[in-house]
Image (tube, rainbow, N blue to C red):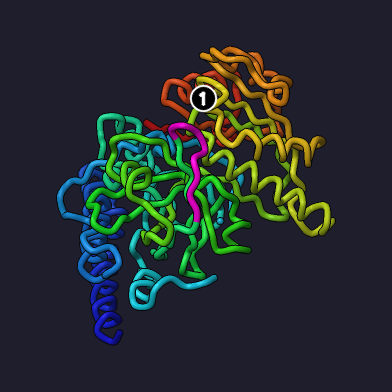
Amino acid sequence: MTTGVNKWAGAVDHVQRQDGHSRRLENDATPDAEAKWVTAATNRLRGSLALLSRHFGVAGRIWSGSASKLGHGGSVGTCHRRAHLSSSGPTVSGSAAAGAAAMIPGLLQGSVGALCSRAASSRVTPRSVRRLSLTSVMKSKKKTDHLERTASFVRREVVSTAKVCGAADESPSVKLLRLLVAEKDFSFKAGQWVDFFIPGVSVVGGFSICSSPRMLEQERTLELAVKYTNHPPALWIHNQCTLDSEVALRVGGEFFFDPQPTDASRNLVLIAGGVGINPLLSILRHAADLHHKERTDKGSSYATGTIKLFYSARNTSELLFKKNILDLVNEFPEKIACSLHVTKQTTPISAELKPYITEGRITKKEIRDHISEETLFYICGPPPMTDFFSKQLEDSHVPKEHVCFEKWW
């Protein structure tokens, strides 16, 4: 154990030195320095993962040092942001958990990109760097390297092991995974994703969390819903993952909803396409938890507004979490409503679902009817869908800070 701790101390020192160099670049506002900063951020991530690979035994060869590929399999993308409203058990095996739970000071400080978090506002970099970051991300459709594409995004400093404690088929093509998280300091905000490190798989996965922060707080578990693709992490989840399989997780992303008790009440409109429901379900569940807390703890918690979910998929079998969504609608009818859309339905729709189903795409009018000064919009789905609705909201003069969107591909 002493040897492992000494190795981690060396790794931390090295990462801190890397981070100090990146911050010096960050403070120089020249275009050349900005480009160097983005490159440094990417290299810093790779270097950090190489250190994890050498010093963190649970994952073996987590990172190969070469440009690993990530096509998210429709599970998570990068946050082409505009965002508002802010804020943020049992242990797994011995030495691996101890190593994985280590805090890595400075690992990802100084990340660029506008933040959705007031708490993280001190890390916002100069405006010119943020513009460069956003431009780079908007061009990232051609990039398949997860770490390169998300190098400028804020990540939490805790890396934790996690053990698979449950698995089920959410649809014919999507597997739901429940993970027991070892590190007690590991946390996330509703809507964020995780870097997903698999022992023996050199490619790093990236998947949005679909459970609520409250589940993690109470049970030390979180859930991911992963679509089947030929991408190595998705293949591992569908074909090789078993109960008690161990992985490592790190939280990242700027697409989230985390209001503080003193924040003004806001209505939410959530627009999801396909597997893009994952982060929006986390937000929906978190809003429901906040409303439940508001009922029982009047006057000292955030006052939730109304929440309307628009969710589109090819057919009802691909509408994920239908029961969970309708359960929330029925539990909080005064607060939560949903409109489920199917675009290529070929079988009869069940009587239970029929009142909530519309055949055809989500329309401009449906969204326009919910525009108000008190409403925040969260969009996640295929790039054409997010482009369509974000452009509509822009054309309707919705303030940019009231719209947060995330693309996956």
Which residue is drawn at the image coordinates 33% and 63% (left, top)?
107
Q: Where does residue 144 sit, x and y in percent of width and height?
A: 26, 37
For mark 1, give the secondary structure: helix
Main SS type for the magenta part? Answer: strand
| Tag 1 residue | 390
Quadrant assignment for the C terminus: top left
The stretch of residues the image draws in magenta is: 166-173
Q: Residue furthest left?
A: 66
Q: Amino acid at mark 1?
A: Ser
Q: Is residue 397 left or right of residue 384?
A: right
Quarter holding residue 328: top right
Residue 245 included in the magenta stretch of the image: no
Q: Where does residue 388 sit, x and y in percent of width and height?
A: 49, 19
Q: Is residue 157 left or right of residue 315?
A: left
Residue 169 included in the magenta stretch of the image: yes
Q: Which residue is more in the foreground, 174 or 266?
A: 174
Q: Residue furthest bottom?
A: 2
Quarter holding residue 19: bottom left
| Pointer 1 local density, CA inside 10 Å: few below 14, some 14–19, many at least 20 | many
Which residue is drawn at the image coordinates 65% and 16% (left, top)?
358
Q: Where does residue 9 sit, x and y in percent of width and height?
A: 28, 78
Q: Is residue 99 above or below residue 363?
A: below
Which residue is drawn at the image coordinates 27% and 80% (left, top)?
4
Q: Is residue 192 visible?
A: no
Q: Is residue 125 left or right of residue 122?
A: left
Q: Which residue is more in the foreground, 22 or 221?
A: 221
Q: Is residue 216 left or right of residue 107?
A: right
